């Protein structure tokens, strides 16, 4: 503990020195160009170029930056003018190269908007879906960026880069954040350390409680899949079995073993995603095996039934409206599709809550990682919007406490990244990015 305290004071002292060094040479400087934007994003999550100051006010930029930092996620936002200093071609790639931070990059260029991400923090499809959902003709920068950040944070993997420290929003120079940090150092670094430690202990206790609830649900899922395997009337050596069938069966068994092994090693809630992803893989393998044995066309790879993933891969989509929410299309199994068509309630997966058994979408945030493994690719927020769990998923607090942190997001990788992930850019006006093949289809880096 003594060593930790000394290191904290040393870090604060170093940052105070940095404050003195930065303030003198840069106060009043006017930062422009990709290199200046990259330098600013190394210090904070939001950069507003002076040429685009009318797009996003300082107050809105500060609030947006604080939201991202509270979530501890590698999301970088740049608001730039559409001029010769920021040519659209290769803008994302150049900014990513000069920033060097693994993360999700969102750029508002003039009236246009688009985003790119390293695959380790978010898939191409997820980014594309998020951009499409927030892009609205004529939308102002504050609305568009806040909508994007709110939807991206819950599913974004990784942690914020260490270089952000406690700095505030960067609008060219991290002066405001450094001044605030200096005030903290002078006023009471020891008190700040005590608060941080208390918050960390609280977070650890909440994670343990969430994991205890998750274990019950995931163990039920693993057991149910094991029972499916036991009931399966298939033997690799049976008459008519071929190598493709044996491969499906082996993959299903491997998924079962992997789920058990992963669950045995889970120590934090976000790690449960990999367990339910393994179970989803296994159930799809069984669906393919069944189709081969019955000489049917192989099923399309679809997400599991929304109402209960134990029902297996979805057979169709149906319109469903949660209590007090808006209608949306959800993937459903054949049995639940028939029930909905007959005006009946689907067979929903219920979990324990403080008020008794409830459908998982009406439960607490602990079940977010469980659902995230089943419904990946950025589709979960859209399925759950307007529900209790969906509302919690959209908060920075959820992303911070349950969103995960064992990926490379926030690491400084410099230019060591796949340039194909970032692609070329074609920023259209009025928020229409991606027309005519821009951004390689829009989405992933």
Image: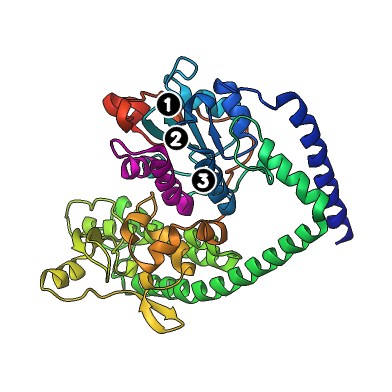
**Is there CB contact under 8 Å for labels 3 and 1?**
no
The residue that disc 3 covers is: 64
| Coordinates of residue 187 in the picture (x, y in percent) | 81, 53
Residue 348 is drawn in which quadrant? bottom left
The residue that disc 2 covers is: 116
Look at 35% across and 52% down and name the residue there: 379
Residue 134 forms part of the magenta stretch: yes
The residue that disc 1 covers is: 423
C-alpha gap between disc 3 and disc 1 = 26 Å
Marked residue nearer the N-terminal end (3 or 1): 3
In depth, the one of 28 and 165 nearer the eye is 28
Q: Is residue 300 visible?
A: yes
Q: Is residue 252 visible?
A: no
The outermost residue toward the bottom is: 356
Q: Which residues are magenta?
A: 127-155
| Coordinates of residue 366 in the picture (x, y in percent) | 49, 68
């Amino acid at each position: 503990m003594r060593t930790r305290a000394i290191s904290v004071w040393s870090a604060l002292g170093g940052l105070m020195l940095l404050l003195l060094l930065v303030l003198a040479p840069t106060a009043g400087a006017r930062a422009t160009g990709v290199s200046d934007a990259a330098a600013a994003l190394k210090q904070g999550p939001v950069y507003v170029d002076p040429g685009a100051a009318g797009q996003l006010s300082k107050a809105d930029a500060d609030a947006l930056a604080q939201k991202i930092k509270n979530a501890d996620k590698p999301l970088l936002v740049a608001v730039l003018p559409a001029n010769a200093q920021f040519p659209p071609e290769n803008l994302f790639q150049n900014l990513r190269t000069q920033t060097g931070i693994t993360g999700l990059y969102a750029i508002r260029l003039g009236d246009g908007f688009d985003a790119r991400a390293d695959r380790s923090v978010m898939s191409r499809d997820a980014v594309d879906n998020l951009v499409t959902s927030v892009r609205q003709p004529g939308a102002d920068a504050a609305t568009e960026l806040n909508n994007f950040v709110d939807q991206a944070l819950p599913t974004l993997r990784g942690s914020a880069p260490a270089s952000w420290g406690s700095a505030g929003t960067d609008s060219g120079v991290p002066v405001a954040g450094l001044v605030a940090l200096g005030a903290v150092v002078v006023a009471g670094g020891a008190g700040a350390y005590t608060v941080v430690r208390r918050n960390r202990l609280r977070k650890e206790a909440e994670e343990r409680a969430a994991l205890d609830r998750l274990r019950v649900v995931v163990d039920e899922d693993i057991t149910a899949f094991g029972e499916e395997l036991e009931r399966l009337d298939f033997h690799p050596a049976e008459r008519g079995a071929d190598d493709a069938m044996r491969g499906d069966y082996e993959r299903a068994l491997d998924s079962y073993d992997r789920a058990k092994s992963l669950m045995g090693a889970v120590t934090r809630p976000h790690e449960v995603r990999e367990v339910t992803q393994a179970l989803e893989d296994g159930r799809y393998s069984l669906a393919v095996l069944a189709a081969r044995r019955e000489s049917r066309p192989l099923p399309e790879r679809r997400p599991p039934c929304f109402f209960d993933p134990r029902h297996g891969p979805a057979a169709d989509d149906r319109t469903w409206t949660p209590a007090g929410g808006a209608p949306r299309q959800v993937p459903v199994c054949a049995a639940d599709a028939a029930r909905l068509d007959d005006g009946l309630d689907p067979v929903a997966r219920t979990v324990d809550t403080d008020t008794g058994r409830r459908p998982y979408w009406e439960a607490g945030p602990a079940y977010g990682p469980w659902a995230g493994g089943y419904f990946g690719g950025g589709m979960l927020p859209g399925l759950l919007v307007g529900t209790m769990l969906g509302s919690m998923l959209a908060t920075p607090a959820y992303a911070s406490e349950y969103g995960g942190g064992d990926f490379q997001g926030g690491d400084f990788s410099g230019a060591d990244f796949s340039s194909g992930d970032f692609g070329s850019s074609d920023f259209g006006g009025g928020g229409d990015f991606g027309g005519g093949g821009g951004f390689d289809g829009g989405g992933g880096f």
